[in-house]
Amino acid sequence: MNLGENIKEFYLELNPFRLVLDTHRGFSATIILFAYMLLFAILIYKITMIVLERIRPAKDPGHEYNRRKVLRTGYLGFFIIIYLPIIFSSLQLLPTVLGLAGAGIVISLKEVWLNMVGWFMIMGGNGFKVGDRIEIDNVKGDVVNIGFLKFSLLEISGDPKAEQSTNRLIHFPNFNIVLHRFFLVSDAMDFVWDEFKISLTVDSDWEKAEKICNHILHEELVLAPELVDEKIRELSKNYLVRLGKSTPIVYTSLEPEGYILLSLRYLTPIRSKRLNRILISKEILRQFKNETEIYFIQPKR
């Protein structure tokens, strides 16, 4: 076989028209045909865009973006419909093509599959439900909707002293539950420990101040011990919970900076955290007002 015949045979093997008509082509021939078809589709799309821009230029960048997006989607759907019968005309390659297509679909839709896995985790025993308060990826909020692919939070202020709604909705894909840890305050145990500090001068009557604070914590808070015990019993059905001491307490310490620190620690419902803090603060100010031996200070930071 001379050089001319070799070139002719090579041309015939790469001739796109021959590849289209050949219904018994092999895998390598199908890959070459696919490359031809892809280049042809891109060329037609580019020519269409150039002609369209000359005939009817876009009014603004937004109009151009939308037009390109519509044309790209339309051309993609059109060429897929036209090309599939040609690709699958060689039935002996059908299992191979379907396997490659399936692998491509799984890889390209990875986040969709992860969202589905996340949905099953959310709906499981260790997940959450609408009404629970969670913190995920440094965002805290109340769950207001759970979908198959995403869930929505009504955002809570990041200030730990506030715990107030910002009235902003934040949507998270469900795969965040798979990839990130989250913190949950559910209806089964909707109370948390809160603590705030009072600084007094060293010459203050700290014993009297401590007594007043203890009285306020035990008398003013509206969190009955039996309610806490009931919540713990309910939570213990699914988790091994040992809460320990659940009654309010005041810790008194002498700080190295030279002042007395009273730390008021108590359990409060998560949604009443700020209200209880305000009520306790007002009562402390009210009762300390007439005490001549108790002096507040602002510690240096």
Image: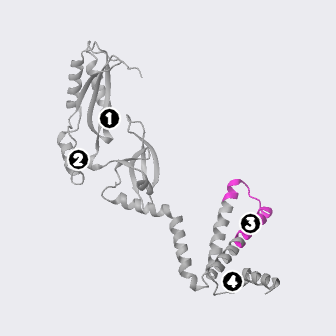
Say whether disc 2 or disc 4 marks the residue closer to the N-terminus: 4
Residue on which the image places disc 2: 241
Mark number displayed over residue 275: 1
**Structural distance between the alpha carbons of marks 3 and 1:** 63 Å
* Most foreground residue, 134 or 242: 242
**Structural distance between the alpha carbons of marks 2 and 4:** 69 Å
The 10 Å Cα crowd at callout 4, few under 14, some 14 to 19, many 20 or more, is: some
Left or right? Give the position of 41 relative to 118. Answer: right
The 10 Å Cα crowd at callout 2, few under 14, some 14 to 19, many 20 or more, is: few
- Prevailing secondary structure of the magenta residues: helix
**Structural distance between the alpha carbons of marks 4 and 3:** 23 Å
Say whether disc 3 or disc 1 marks the residue closer to the N-terminus: 3
**Structural distance between the alpha carbons of marks 1 and 2:** 27 Å
Residue on which the image places disc 3: 46
**Structural distance between the alpha carbons of marks 3 and 2:** 65 Å
Q: Secondary structure at mark 2?
A: loop
* Quadrant position of residue 47: bottom right
Which residue lies most toward the right here? 4
> What residue is shown at x 29% (from left), y 49% (from top)?
187
Mark number displayed over residue 20: 4
Specify the segment rendered in magenta: 40-65
Q: Residue 48's x, y, as percent?
A: 75, 68
Q: Secondary structure at mark 4?
A: helix
How many numbered marks does the figure carry? 4
Is residue 98 shown above or below 239? below
Q: Amino acid at mark 3?
A: Lys
Say whether disc 1 or disc 4 marks the residue closer to the N-terminus: 4
On whether residue 108 falls in the magenta region, the answer is no
Q: Amino acid at mark 2?
A: Val
